[in-house]
Image (cartoon, rainbow, N blue to C red):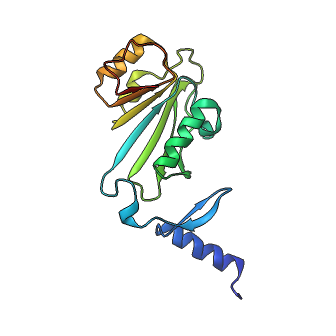
Amino acid sequence: CDASEMTVRRALNELQDEGLIVRERAKGTRVALPEEERILPHKNIHIGVISPREVTPDFHRQGASGQITEGIFSLLNIHKEKMEWTSPADTEPTQCTWSNQSGNIKVTCVGQANTSYEAHPPLEAVKAQDFDGIISLSIVDDEWLEQLLDLEIPTVLTDYARTTFRDRADHIY
């Protein structure tokens, strides 16, 4: 092939921008799924992943919470390269948002502030996101979880060993 590296890169970038290919670090480039095979192609979904610790751009690579988040990304075809993150003030809750290639599915991870010892983000930070569903990762503060469930958003509690919310949460793992 006589095309320059710059021409090939530009062509691949255009194909990616048009949603025809998917490029993933350490995995390579592949053809994007046809529209009819995409998850929920005609619906916008915003999933909240609530963390008991700070959320950073590499949050999905750390510990059990990271493994759960990676599983969510894989299931929903979320591309980790499509991330929104701004460094908050030390007293502000931390968060990152990732979306799928077509942009109709977003996952926002919200965690405690850098200087907080609460082991959960402020409930107001969760309310402000207008989530369609929530996955709570290892948060065990019963009073806070009670308020979270009062929001009446479909919620899954992970790494919660007690039976306190057995009849209120959608699932407990």
Q: Nearer the viewer, residue 123 or 60?
A: 60
Q: Residue 48 location, x and y as percent?
A: 42, 35
- Judge from the rendering whether residue 39 lies leftward or rightward of residue 71; answer left or right: left
Q: Residue 41 location, x and y as percent?
A: 34, 58
**Residue reaching furthest to the bottom:** 2
Which residue does the image show at 59% across and 37% down from the upper left?
Answer: 67
Q: Name which quarter of the figure residue 87 lies in.
A: top right
Residue 2, compared with residue 81, is above or below; it is: below
Q: Residue 83 location, x and y as percent?
A: 53, 48
Residue 93 in sight from this viewpoint: no
Residue 87, compared with residue 36, is above or below; it is: above
Residue 35, compared with residue 103, is above or below; it is: below
- Judge from the rendering whether residue 98 lies leftward or rightward of residue 8; answer left or right: left
Q: Name which quarter of the figure residue 127 lies in.
A: top left
Name the quarter where the N terminus is drawn: bottom right
Q: Nearer the viewer, residue 67 or 100?
A: 67
- Judge from the rendering whether residue 39 lies leftward or rightward of residue 113; answer left or right: left
Q: Residue 50 location, x and y as percent?
A: 47, 29
Which residue does the image show at 44% across and 21% down from the upper left?
Answer: 122
Which residue does the image show at 34% across and 53% down from the upper left?
Answer: 40
- Judge from the rendering whether residue 25 lies leftward or rightward of residue 55; answer left or right: right
Which residue does the image show at 30% across and 57% down from the upper left?
Answer: 42
Residue 11, compared with residue 128, is above or below; it is: below
Residue 7 in sight from this viewpoint: yes
All told, the count of numbered labels is: 0
